[in-house]
Amino acid sequence: MATHLVWFRNDLRVNDNLALSAACRDPDARVMGIFIATPGQWRQHDMSPRQAEFIWQHVQSLHAALAQRGINLVIHEVDNFDDSLAHLKTFCTSHNVDALFYNYQYELNERQRDAAVEKMLGCEVICQGFDDSVLLPPGSVTTGNHEMYKVFTPFSRAFIKQLHEGLPECVSAPKARGAALETQKLNAFDYPRKAVDSTLFPVGEQQAINQLRQFCRQPVADYQQQRDFPANDGTSRLSAYLAIGVLSPRQCLHRLLKEHPQALEGGAGAVWLNELIWREFYRHLLVAYPKLCRHQPFISWTDNVVWQQDEAQFIAWQQGQTGFPIVDAAMRQLNATGWMHNRLRMVTASFLVKDLLIDWRLGERYFMSQLIDGDLAANNGGWQWAASTGTDAAPYFRIFNPTTQGERFDAKGAFIRQWLPELNDVPDKFIHTPWLWAQKEQLTLDYPQPIVDHKQARIATLAAYEAARKSE
Ligand code: FAD
């Protein structure tokens, strides 16, 4: 009887899991699972304690879901990737593993680790990898010259064309392979964890599926109108599940098309599909341009920008104390919940880079250290987009005005008031400029004055980028 080992990483689910499904295809094989926590690696990449908790909760549910199917999931902990190689080798030898199944991860360190694993196991263990966390494999959506697209819109067009030619299929959860196993008490890994608000992010694969179904029934059709207003619950909030693989993008696509078959033709749901394609775009970019994984800018000359080293301003931004209400409310949402609305990720990132002229990489790291949905590809892509160092088609002189962004997307300040109770008494008219109200009424607010003058900051930033471009 052959022994198949499934190495779970960012794919903590039993439904539509390509590696798990392949490992279970032979009905006679003995199937086991392994999850190797690597806290040293997580520390190096500032994984947020909320995401660590979310992973921990889902490792436990996966353990239970597999046990019900007669598959044992063992949880091990080593410090870093090098240790995980040796560990895997010993495990395969002691359990007579014939074949190892895993789903690819596209970050550079992870790809190098997987290559080392394949080399180390040699011909003793057959290794099979799968493109599971994407709709279409990196490298499969390219220009006529077989190169990766450098801007999103043509990538998206080519992507949709390929989906028209054939949709990636979902695979079912494996059937039980024997009597259910007893679940064991698992030891939590040695990494700081922080409580997750279960009303925002209920635990479990079924919960994620329910949330997807509910969102695709109606909200997805209103997504285009609702998605930019942070006070409305207009987006899916599925990112936390997608980031650790509790949900797959194929499940999202199929559910969307079941409810809105015209989404591929630009009908209802098309705008949400476009966001799923942004996710793919950033993953494909990581593989085509591995320097992104080393946090190097996509546009090389932007490395010459001379950044400000203002610790006090950086801390004010982190803590939501900049004096710009929409920025501060967003940062407090992030700090309190581990999630931030997409519009506000753009606004806060733009503020750090283009108003404070602070290196985007510091913001990128800070986001990773807080986000429950932290994902290198999407986070790096988002930060480079906001900093104009990346693949954005718009030039670097696009600079968001934090006050007008607030006025456009949170006109009456409903979102701001939710996170900045100290501004509750400020009339709607002044909610984006409370300092003017305080001046007018001769009051002292328990809220900071703006830490920069946006107009001056804009001029300084344009000059810094221009100087960097000229020094190319
Ligand atoms: P929805 O609007 O419902 O979108 C559905 C799914 O599509 C999301 O769950 C996500 O997986 C994907 N998606 C949506 N927008 C984007 C996008 N612009 N780029 C890539 N994928 C997208 N997303 C992350 O998942 N992890 C991150 O670490 C992350 N960091 C970001 C940092 C910055 C500076 C910016 C501007 C964006 C970042 N995003 C990140 C993208 C986006 O903000 C989030 O995916 C989105 O807010 C998650 O909410 P949702 O699930 O309700 O999204």
Image (cartoon, rainbow, N blue to C red):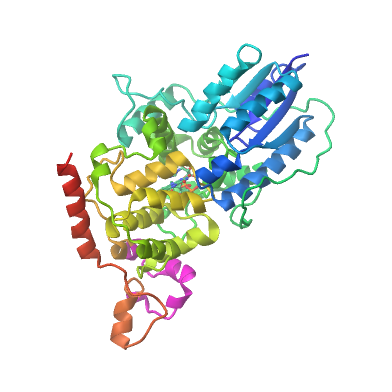
The picture places residue 107, in percent across and down from the top left corner, at 47, 33
The picture places residue 155, in percent across and down from the top left corner, at 34, 31
The picture places residue 277, in percent across and down from the top left corner, at 42, 36
- The residue lying toward the viewer, choosing from 398 and 412, is 398
- The residue lying toward the viewer, choosing from 82 and 452, is 82
Asked whether residue 87 is in view, the answer is yes
Q: Quick check: is 297 in the magenta stretch?
A: no
Q: Quadrant of residue 85?
A: top right
Asked whether residue 268 is in view, the answer is no
Tell me what residue is drawn at x 24 percent, y 48 percent: 305
* Drawn side of residue 102 relative to residue 339, left or right: right
In the depicted structure, whether residue 14 falls above or below residue 101: below
| Number of numbered discs overlaid on the protein picture | 0
The residue range painted magenta reads 406-430
* Drawn side of residue 127 relative to residue 175, left or right: left
Tell me what residue is drawn at x 62 percent, y 31 percent: 84
Tell me what residue is drawn at x 45 percent, y 53 percent: 366
In the depicted structure, whether residue 229 falls above or below residue 12: below
Residue pushed farthest bottom?
Answer: 442
In the depicted structure, whether residue 27 falls above or below residue 362: above
The picture places residue 335, in percent across and down from the top left corner, at 50, 60
Task: Identify the main secondary structure in magenta.
Answer: helix
* Drawn side of residue 390 relative to residue 30, left or right: left
Q: Quick check: is 419 in the magenta stretch?
A: yes
- The residue lying toward the viewer, choosing from 10 and 403, is 10
Residue pushed farthest left?
Answer: 470
Tell me what residue is drawn at x 58 percent, y 52 percent: 49
Q: Quadrant of residue 41?
A: top right
